[in-house]
Image: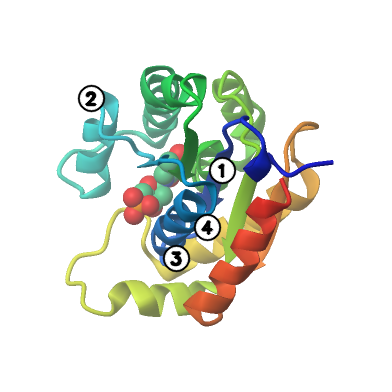
Amino acid sequence: MSSALETERPLFIVFEGIDGAGTTTQAQAACAWLEESTQNPVFLTREPSQGPIGALLHQALRRRIEFDPRVMSLLFAADRLDHLFEEIQQHLKDGVAVICDRYYLSSLAYQMVDAPQDLEWLDQLNAKAISPDLTILLDVPADVAMDRICRGRLNLDLYENLDRQKLVRDNYLHLAEHRRRPDERIEVVDGHRAQEQVLSDICELIASV
Ligand code: TMP
């Protein structure tokens, strides 16, 4: 069986992890590697998106405005579908691979902290978000991630505190193990290593899709 790198099928790859896990750094590095390997452009994007609903979320995350946690869940899910319909699916349709820094697993892992009993509802809200070909979950202990975030930063975003980060990490690991969709592939990668080592594992995983 040939790898998706050798076929025309554009890949949809997602990076997930707690704040400070390195999703942004590794998504950028993986994007450069994939472009080089395939000699084709890759669309690198992130959630919350740069769209109108994403803009509201960015303000809420910076504490410029405040929403009830249930409203945040709805906004994250709405931003996701807007991003999917307006950008991600367009690129995939044009044959361009997409790498997305955060996607629906973030909604489950983060928003379920506020209301674990709402997991089914969160799943429903995200049911129209297509499954990626591969989700890479960068796993880093919460205290290590918080140290990374606090280095050189004065203000912390809404969810950037140690207690919450611990709960989000537990949620991610639980979801990856017990709640993955039937058509979903989630790989947990140890993110508490040198950047090049982490990237090497990631490239191997992408090449195996
Ligand atoms: P980031 O842009 O630095 O990754 O920050 C986005 C923050 O928003 C981060 O704390 C994770 C959080 N988030 C959610 O709580 N739910 C979601 O669905 C998404 C996409 C992000």
Is 38 or 113 nearer to us in this picture? 38
Residue 17, labelled with which disc?
4
Structural distance between the alpha carbons of marks 4 and 1: 14 Å
Please tell me whether mark 3 sits on a helix, a strand or a loop.
loop
Is 131 or 4 nearer to us in this picture? 4
**Sequence-first disc among 2 and 4:** 4
Q: Nearer the viewer, mark 3 or mark 2?
A: 3
Structural distance between the alpha carbons of marks 3 and 1: 15 Å
Q: Which residue is mark 2?
A: 52
Is 98 or 80 nearer to us in this picture? 98
**Quadrant in the picture for residue 27:** bottom left
67 with respect to 93 (left or right): left
Q: Are marks 3 and 1 in contact (CB under 8 Å)?
A: no
Question: The N terminus appears in which quarter of the rendering?
Answer: top right
Q: Amino acid at mark 1?
A: Ile
Structural distance between the alpha carbons of marks 2 and 4: 24 Å
Please tell me whether mark 1 sits on a helix, a strand or a loop.
strand
Q: Are marks 2 and 4 in contact (CB under 8 Å)?
A: no
Asked if residue 167 shows in the view, the reply is: yes
Furthest toward the front, the residue is 39
**Sequence-first disc among 3 and 1:** 1
Residue 152, labelled with which disc?
none
Task: Characterize the local packing of mark 1: few (<14), some (14-19) or many (20 or more) Cα atoms within 10 angstroms.
Answer: many
Q: Which residue is mark 1?
A: 13
**Sequence-first disc among 2 and 1:** 1
Q: Position of residue 19 (x, y in %)?
A: 42, 61
Q: Position of residue 119 (x, y in %)?
A: 63, 34
**Sequence-first disc among 3 and 2:** 3
Q: Amino acid at mark 4?
A: Gly
Asked if residue 112 shows in the view, the reply is: no
Q: Which residue is mark 3?
A: 22
Q: Amino acid at mark 3?
A: Gly
